[in-house]
Amino acid sequence: MGAPKRNRKKYEKPKDMWSNERINSDGAFLKEYGLKNMKELWMVQTEVSRVRRNAREFLSGSASNTMQENEMIARLTKFGITKNGATLDDLLDLNERSFLERRLQSVVMRKGLARTMSQARQLIVHGFISINGKRVNRPGYLVSLQEESMLGYYKPIQIAVKKGEAESVAASDEPARTEQNQEKENS
């Protein structure tokens, strides 16, 4: 049992909810990054506005705390959202794309583990993607730069190459499998 959790929304809805221009631009983001619904985009937009708001407060001097400033910059650098040596002025230039590019769904597609964003989302949700051998099933998971090299398949999957044919793909033991197959063929 335990204490009840205090549920809070992790996003803010846009003020101009029915603006045709905003709907079209947000719709383009949904298609480009394979997002499920507007809520996922609003969560990213809220995070961007929170980072930019904190940077403005630090720059104004009203909430000057160099330790917090460095922690915020280090966190964004760890995830590859900003470059090394970024300043508070660089944080004001952040946009949704910088966060959307670091989502697990985008990284899986960019690394070639999936052909499309929707296929990347499906592989993640169905449990075929792992980071360092640990299954991750959240498409919105922010991938750090260190974790990006450890990204792979959790278990072998069948990807249809042509109609009627299938190709088995394994995460890290693909060369070992081909050597085993060659030994079987030679015997």
Image (cartoon, grey):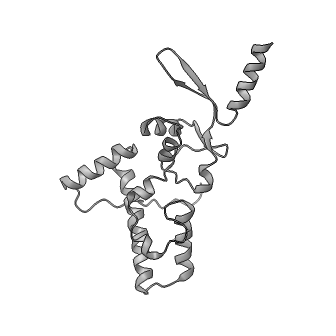
Percent of width and height locating residue 63? 46, 84
Q: Nearer the viewer, residue 94 or 178?
A: 178
Question: From this viewpoint, which residue is outermost toward the right?
Answer: 187
The reply, left or right, for residue 112 in relation to residue 116 is: right
Occupied quadrant, residue 176: top right
Count of numbered circles on the image: 0
Task: Name above or below for residue 172 compared with residue 67.
Answer: above
Instruction: Residue at 58%, 44% (x, y): give it.
Output: 136
Please identify the quarter of the rendering in which residue 157 is found: top right
In front of the other: 76 or 1: 76
102 on left or right of 14: right
Q: Is residue 123 above or below residue 50?
A: above
Quarter containing the C terminus:
top right
Q: Quadrant of the N terminus?
A: bottom right
Residue 11 in the figure: left or right of residue 178: left
Examine the image and state in which quarter residue 171 appears.
top right
Residue drawn at (66%, 46%) of the image: 132
Q: Residue at x 74, y 20 (%)?
A: 182
Residue at 59 percent across and 50 percent down: it is 148
**Residue projecting furthest to the bottom:** 61
Q: x%, y% of residue 104?
A: 51, 48
Where residue 170 sits: x, y (%)?
A: 64, 31
Residue 133 vertical position relative to residue 42 in the rendered view, above or below: above
